[in-house]
Image (cartoon, rainbow, N blue to C red):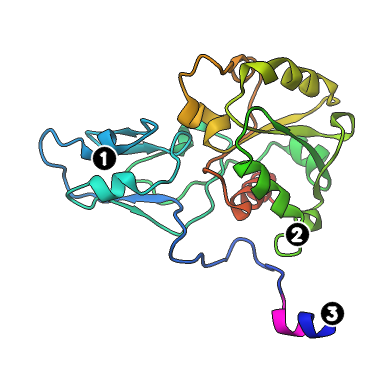
């Protein structure tokens, strides 16, 4: 064990806001200001989840799966995925990126939320029809690299012990009752976090007859964490930036 520790070095990410991601990582899209050719919509046609609007070009990160199809299709090479993983926000419209947007920043939580949840936050995760991609990344938050618990944020086994729920998946119809029961079991005050494109917009399943998104319309959403799946650092920075930690 001592030899392994020496070989691995220090595995902990001490500064979660200052990580340089590997080149293959695709984070916040950067949209160039070069004008598009008249009538050009190659990027929108290539998008599998209809996350792109043209004239001007805008990308909805709440729908985006962060595939490179749009960047590859654009003849002007206007779209480039950067290494910026700080994508979380508590304002849904903030997830729409255009040529003017350089960063996504969540608004700070209210003083009441900070007072109640600022030092200790317990979350119950609900997979509402997810593929297990987002769930695996959330599970990684407890490992030694990311160590979400050092910020006083932990996942709990029961909604009765939680301060809020983290929802993954497109909200399938057969999970709608279970999701509502879980939410009701969380003591008030409570927060709701949507993690991944499926939870935020339905993702690749948007428009399917097998999903039921009434929960989203009925309840206030406190935080959106985009991605397919979101990187663990995206989830961590979204919460701590929102809480002002």
Residue 54 image point, x, y percent? 25, 34
Residue 212 image point, x, y percent? 59, 16
Residue visible at 58% across and 30% down in the picture: 199
Residue projecting furthest to the right: 161
Residue 1 has which mark?
Answer: 3
Picture quadrant of residue 128: top right
Disc 2 and disc 1: Cα gap in Å? 38 Å
Q: Residues within 10 Å of mark 2 (few under 14, many from 20)?
A: few
Q: Is residue 9 visible?
A: no
Disc 1 and disc 3: Cα gap in Å? 51 Å
Residue 160 image point, x, y percent? 89, 29
Residue annotated with mark 1: 43
Horizontally, residue 196 falls left or right of residue 125, namely: left
Q: Is residue 144 above or below residue 39?
A: below
The residue nearer to you, when weighing 186 against 6, is: 6
Q: In terms of secondary structure, where does tag 3 sit?
A: loop
Residue visible at 46% across and 53% down in the picture: 27
Residue visible at 36% across and 38% down in the picture: 59
Q: In terms of secondary structure, where does tag 2 sit?
A: loop
Q: Is residue 142 visible?
A: yes
Q: Nearer the viewer, mark 3 or mark 2?
A: 3
Q: Is residue 99 above or below residue 168?
A: below
Disc 3 and disc 2: Cα gap in Å? 17 Å
Q: Is residue 61 above or below residue 221?
A: below
Residue annotated with mark 2: 143
Magenta region includes residue 7: yes
Q: Quadrant of the N terminus?
A: bottom right
In the image, the segment drawn in magenta is 6-10
């Amino acid at each position: 064990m001592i030899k392994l520790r020496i070989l691995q070095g220090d595995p902990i990410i001490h500064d979660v806001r200052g990580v340089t991601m590997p080149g293959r990582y695709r984070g916040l899209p950067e949209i160039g200001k070069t004008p598009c050719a008249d009538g050009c919509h190659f990027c929108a046609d290539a998008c599998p989840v209809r996350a792109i609007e043209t004239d001007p070009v805008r990308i909805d990160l709440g729908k985006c799966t962060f595939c490179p199809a749009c960047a590859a299709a654009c003849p002007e090479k206007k779209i480039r995925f950067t290494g910026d993983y700080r994508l979380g926000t508590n304002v849904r419209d903030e997830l729409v990126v255009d040529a003017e947007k350089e960063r996504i920043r969540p608004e700070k939580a209210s003083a009441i939320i900070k007072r109640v949840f600022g030092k200790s936050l317990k979350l119950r995760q609900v997979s509402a029809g997810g593929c297990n991609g987002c769930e695996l990344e959330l599970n990684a938050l407890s490992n030694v690299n990311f160590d979400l618990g050092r910020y006083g944020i932990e996942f709990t086994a029961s909604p009765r012990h939680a301060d809020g729920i983290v929802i993954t998946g497109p909200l399938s119809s057969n999970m709608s009752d279970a999701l509502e029961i879980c939410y009701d079991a969380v003591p008030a005050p409570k927060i709701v976090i949507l993690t991944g494109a499926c939870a935020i917009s339905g993702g690749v399943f948007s428009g399917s007859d097998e999903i039921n998104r009434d929960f989203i319309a009925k309840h206030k959403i406190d935080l959106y964490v985009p991605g397919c799946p979101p990187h663990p650092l995206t989830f961590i920075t979204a919460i701590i930036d929102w809480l002002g930690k």
